[in-house]
Amino acid sequence: MPVFINIARGCFVGFLLIFPFTAQASSSAGETVIERGSIDDDYYAAGGVVDIDASVAGDVIVAGGEIYIGHLVEGDVIAAGGTLKIRGEVRDDIRIAGGDINVDAVIADDLAAAGGSITLSPGTTVGGNAWLAGGEIHMAGTIHGNLKLAGGHIRLSGRVRGDVEIDGAEIEILEGAQIDGELDYKSPQPATADDGATVSGKITYEAADWGYADHGFGLFFSITLAVASILFYLFFPHYTVASVKRMGSDPWSSLGLGFIFTVATPMVAFMLMLIVLGLWVGLSLLALYCVALLSGFLIGCFFIADLGAKLLKLDIASRGRRLISVIAVIFLLGLIQLIPLLGGLILFLLLLFGLGAGLLQLRYVYRPVEAPS
């Protein structure tokens, strides 16, 4: 895993920690966000507690400590948080990441989830395919497509109409489990299967060591980074667009400034921390450094999205299209980072370019206004 990915993990955590303080400026953000009734468009929210028991005509995109989504969502659900509970009906895809995930919903299309603990209740149905990655996974629902699981402790007691692929440390096929297709799994030891479980297709087992960090975090990282990009754009739309333009108009200055900031800032912070009176200043500088790195990478992602749209002659001027395009770029970059050496280098350069462009743009945002003569 490239060093940049490890840095970005910490940066995203730092972003979520400071986000509640910046969220007060939006009516759909705060310590507690509650929505009832009906919403005729897409809905975005962030906060300590986000409770959406409403009928939403578009997509739902949220981040927070505790997230509850119920009733009806006509579009996609993209969410990241500490605790997530999804109920009701979702008529498109669900992409979620969190510490504790509980799904009891009817999902028309695909489901992608990554977290510490993931539970799909018996009442859950997924019309398409499902990808689940977590420390503990219990799949008791019905999957109409294929199912892929990666986790430490995996329990399967539901029905899968397609094929099942499992990569886990401990695998249990419980009573009532039904797999209409093939079962292909990797684990340090063979799975335990109840006599009441049925597998219609071929069963293939491969003995393999389990490493959660290599199997589960990629999906989690992509989803959480996608949510971070959405929140970043919603709260700083003009700055984001201006920084992207700055990156295109002055790329080499952006690269040089990004490199200097990346190398020099930690050195200054650690030197300050060696001085008793400079300890908290140094820690604060490191926190801002992490936020700056994440912001720079997100600016780079928006730049790639804009560049791709120009090459493909697509119109992404609207907020929704721009966000969809940058999410596509983030998941594409998630695949690119798997390329040894080259993938990590590409992401690191993108970070430097975006970071430098963001810093250059700040100069124009906060430059003093000249008094009229």
Image: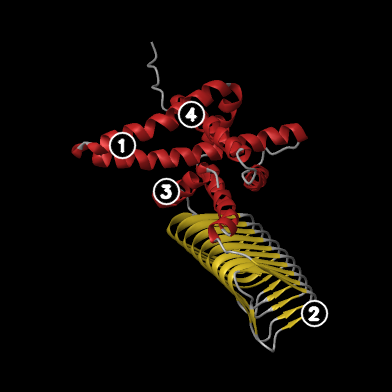
What amino acid is labelled 4 in the image? Answer: Gly
**Left or right: 118 in relation to 59:** left
Q: 254 or 334, which lies in front? A: 334
- Asked if one can make out residue 313 in the rendered structure from this viewpoint, the answer is no
Crowding near the residue tagged with mark 4, few <14, some 14–19, many ≥20 C-alpha atoms within 10 Å? many
Q: Which labelled disc corresponds to residue 75?
A: none
User: Residue under circle 3?
Assistant: 14
What is the spatial separation of the Cα atoms under label 1 and label 4, in whole angstroms?
19 Å
Residue at the spot x=66%, y=47% of the render?
335
Label 3: few (<14), some or many (≥20) within 10 Å?
Answer: some
Q: Which residue is mark 4?
A: 258
Whichever of labels 3 and 4 marks the residue nearer the N terminus, that label is 3
Q: Find out whether the residues at labels 1 and 3 contact each other: C-beta distance under 8 Å.
A: no
Query: Is residue 247 positioned above or below 188 on the image?
Result: above
Nearer the N terminus, badge 2 or badge 3? 3
In this rendering, position of residue 350 left or right of residue 161: left
Q: The disc labelled 1 sits on which kind of residue? A: Phe
Residue bearing mark 1 = 270
Alpha carbon distance from label 2 to label 4: 56 Å
- What residue does disc 2 label? 200
